[in-house]
Image (cartoon, rainbow, N blue to C red):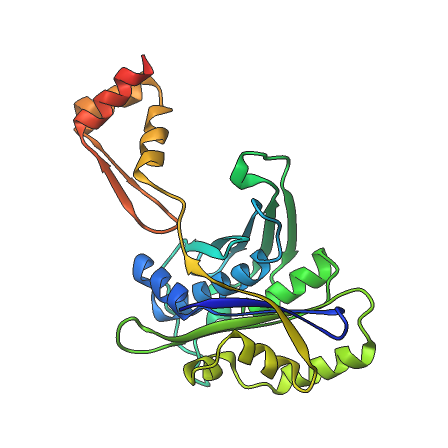
Amino acid sequence: MDKLIHATAADGTVRVISAVTTGIVAEAIRRHGTSPTVSAALGRMLTGTLLLGSTIKEFDRLTAKIDCSGEVGGITAEATKIGTVRGFVKNPIAEPPPKANGKFDVSGIVGDGNFVVIREAGFEIGFRPEPYVGSVPIVSGEIAEDFAYYLAKSEQIPSAVLLGVLLQNSEPFVAASGGVLIQMMPGANDHIVTMIEDTVSRAPHVTELVKEGAGPEDLARVALGVIDFEVLDERPVSFQCTCSLEKAAGMIAALGEDEIRAMIEEDKGAVMNCGFCNETYSLATSDIERLLGENR
């Protein structure tokens, strides 16, 4: 089961969030049919957004977007406080040649552009003031570095971000996925910061650890080295979309009468696809006629 933890270290001056997301990424690439390189990019984006989204308040929503010039066209992920995440890419089949070292060229399919984070307070309960939107240039396209750069420049929180996706040739095609977010809070000691930077720079890749059976607490321990930490909470996390047949019907009901009649007479029904999860909803002519009657 995928899991996320919140922890604290150095007398509360260091915040650590880590997660294993193997199941989440496997579900996302199954739904979207992504190429290997896009799978790695989408998996990193989902994991990073899940980590950052766990810091928001209850009923809020956090969306992270990469608007880019690369072949992938753009990546969007959306997370909630309770540990759900969903996401999609504009071009799921982008697949450039691998790098010289054999690794996926994630930065190549991302290219230049902007990394954007949108925080929406009270979204889940219908209280929707103007959202907070932060944006920074893409600095590497490798995604982990872009999360860290955004946090440092837009939210003034020095952070280290580790994200990884390891693929395999057979279903579910994801051997391991996970990530760690370390944030330096006000009052963080310079010596502690230097120790963490050194440990993170030498740490094994998170996917190697997850593949060997490491959980979120193990990932945090490797990232922090000799620095002790305390786990504050632990929660299951999952790929979960908010779409439904009822919402699809509601969107149709909100259309004008002429458009609804065209669906009945010309299309003989309606088919709607959710971009976030690729789920398809079909409404028969009788279903649409009922919606038309309810609107009168």
The residue closer to the viewer here, 176 or 10, is 10
The vertical placement of 290 against 164, above or below, is above
Q: Residue at x 43, y 85 (%)?
A: 212
Q: Is residue 9 visible?
A: yes
Residue 214, position in %: x, y? 47, 81
Disc tally is: 0
Residue 151 picture location, percent across and down? 68, 61
Whether residue 283 sits left or right of residue 178 in the image: it is left
Outermost top residue:
296
Above or below: residue 68 compared with residue 191: above
Instruction: Using the rendered image of the protein, determine whether residue 139 is visible from the camera's viewpoint.
Output: no
At horizontal 52% and vertical 41% (from top left) the residue drawn is 124
Choose top left, top right, bottom left or bottom right for residue 128.
top right
Q: Which one is in front, 54 or 259?
A: 54
Position of residue 233 measured from the top left corner of the image (x, y, whole percent): 58, 65
- Please name the residue shown 44% across and 66% down the image: 43
- The quadrant of the rendering that contains the N terminus is bottom left
- Relative image position of residue 83 (x, y in whole percent): 50, 57
Against 91, is 233 above or below? Answer: below
Q: Quadrant of residue 89?
A: bottom left
Question: Would residue 226 be found to the left or right of residue 171 on screen?
Answer: right
- The vertical placement of 202 against 54, above or below, is below
Apparent side of residue 247 relative to residue 66 in the rendered image (left or right) = left
Quadrant housing the C terminus:
top left
